[in-house]
Amino acid sequence: MGSGSDWTVFLDHLGIASLDLGYGEEDGGGIYHSIYDDFYWYTHFSDTDFSYGRALSQTAGTAVMRLADADLLPYDFTGLADTIHRYVDELQKLLQTKQDDAVERNKELEEGVFTAIADPKKTSVPPPAEEVPPHLNFAPLQNALDALTHSAERYQKAIEKVSSNGELRVSPAELHALNEKLMQSERKLTSADGLPRRPWFEHLIYAPGAYTGYGVKTIPGVREAIEQKKWKEADEQIARAAIALQDEAALIDSAAQELESGSR
């Protein structure tokens, strides 16, 4: 999720796990913030028999009841690890693309490509040579991601070990303590210092882009530093994001250990 009045403060500032549900892609998105978006329009042009409204209500309602009635919060940390793995890969590809583009531009300048293809009837100046981006140290993020992956797998195995026919062999007191811990898992991905130049945004994995409005940036401190060619800042933000992921991995390991202890 990027930014929106419904969840921005919860996810981006407070670090509360959030979920956005919706159906789409069958039309252009319907009517958004329009004076014509009233009950008459809805029942005559949009969802005349409430099929879509019913389906979405049932989906959201089922999800809410599943969360509210769960003895143990149904978090899947293996999915989290896989997703962040993809984000880290994207960051490395982003840097590589910028390096390749800079090398290619400088080669074309040396070979006189811009001068050769210039329109002789128009005044033009070749672009300046571009500094090739340096290699960044992604090792802290990769090591933290390995720790997160291992802790997520350990937690999943611990859940399976204490589960039988959909029931958990864990005492109410242990479940309460475990849920209290799991509720802090999203907080571990935040930092009180916030993102560079916008400290209110404390989540280090998700934030709306500084210049994209609603659009999301994943691992934003690193991604935006690369996009803005702030290489020292990029290395600093890699280290910050890695610490958050290590803290997350430690919390998940602790939760897994509690489950393992309770099953003995």
Image: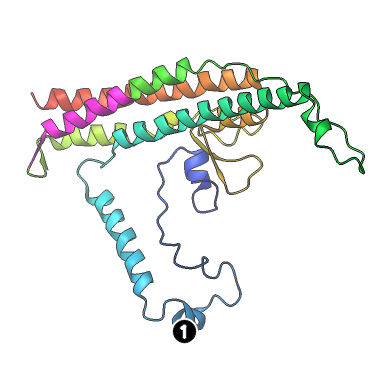
Q: Is residue 16 among the parts visible in the rendering?
A: yes
Residue occupying image coordinates x 51% and y 40%: 12
Residue range highlighted in magenta: 149-164
Residue occupying image coordinates x 41% and y 25%: 245
User: What element does badge 1 sit on?
Assistant: helix
Of the residues shown, which amino acid type is indicated by label 1? His
| Image position of 76 with respect to 247: above or below | below
| Image position of 75 with respect to 19: above or below | above
Q: Nearer the viewer, residue 57 or 13?
A: 57
| Image position of 50 with respect to 100: above or below | below
Instruction: Give the quadrant of residue 123.
Output: top right
Q: Nearer the viewer, residue 259 or 78?
A: 78
Q: Which residue is mark 1?
A: 44
Q: Quadrant of the C terminus?
A: top left
**Rendered location of residue 95, percent (x, y):** 57, 26
Instruction: Answer left or right for 188 relative to 170.
Output: right
Mark 1 crowdedness (10 Å alpha carbons): few <14, some 14-19, many ≥20: few
Q: Nearer the viewer, residue 174 or 11?
A: 11
Q: Is residue 194 among the parts visible in the rendering?
A: no
